[in-house]
Amino acid sequence: MKRISKPASVHITNLYSKNRLNLTKISRLTQKVSKALRLKQGLSLVFLNDTKMRTVNREYHGVDETTDVLAFESPKHWPHLPGAKGLLGEIVISVDRVIRYAKEYQVKQGEELMRYVIHGILHLLGERDHRVKARAKMFIKQEKLLRLFRSFDGIIR
């Protein structure tokens, strides 16, 4: 008898109001990445705009500028999900950046969003991208995981 493992939980906080996000599809795709990485702990995803991302970056990193994705390991920092237990961490994503860079790199917005989710998960697992060699290694892992998906349609409407 084959054991079926329970998918890792995905908690989503959507603070982005300009476009509709398909939270069910994002959750399902995030669970697929979690399964591929054999994660046992759940994740928290927070979607917001550039202005709110700048505030989070300033409050938690002392950097007064916006960014595309931030990852907070559990349990030290919980900007949007205080008291959560059993989570690997929280990934905060600027949907404004997703849309801007998807256009710039000529990829689907849903693909770019999932790229940020994967990037955040890899950071929570200890991957770093501050040095050129480490960044290249992380990029290869990220793009390999991104290829798990057949379709990014309908993630952002």
Image (cartoon, rainbow, N blue to C red):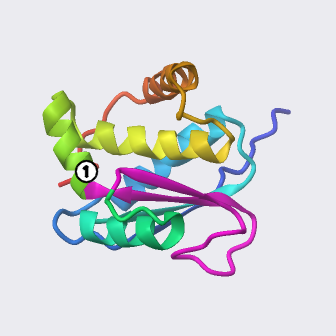
Residue 46 percent location from the top left of the image = 44, 65
Q: Is residue 145 visible?
A: yes
Check the image and name the residue furthest to the bottom: 83
Q: Quadrant of the N terminus?
A: top right
Q: Is residue 108 above or below residue 45?
A: above
In the displayed structure image, the side of residue 128 where residue 2 appears, left or right: right
In the displayed structure image, the side of residue 94 where residue 148 appears, left or right: right
Residue 85 percent location from the top left of the image = 74, 71
In the displayed structure image, the side of residue 120 where residue 112 appears, left or right: left
Residue type, numbered disc 1: Arg
Check the image and name the residue furthest to the right: 1
Q: Quadrant of the C terminus?
A: bottom left
Q: Is residue 151 above or below residue 31?
A: above
- In the image, what residue occupies the spot 32% across and 59% down? 66
Task: Please report the bounds of the magenta region as a residue range.
Answer: 67-95
Q: Is residue 148 above or below residue 50?
A: above
- In the image, what residue occupies the spot 49% across and 40% down? 119
- Residue 83, image quadrant: bottom right
State the SS at label 1: helix
- In the image, what residue occupies the spot 81% across and 38% down? 3
Residue 26 percent location from the top left of the image = 41, 51
Residue 143 percent location from the top left of the image = 45, 24
Q: Is residue 13 visible?
A: no
Q: Residues within 10 Å of mark 1 (few under 14, many from 20)?
A: many
Residue beneath label 1, please? 97
- Residue 108, image quadrant: top left
Pick whichever, 18 or 5, lies toward us.
18
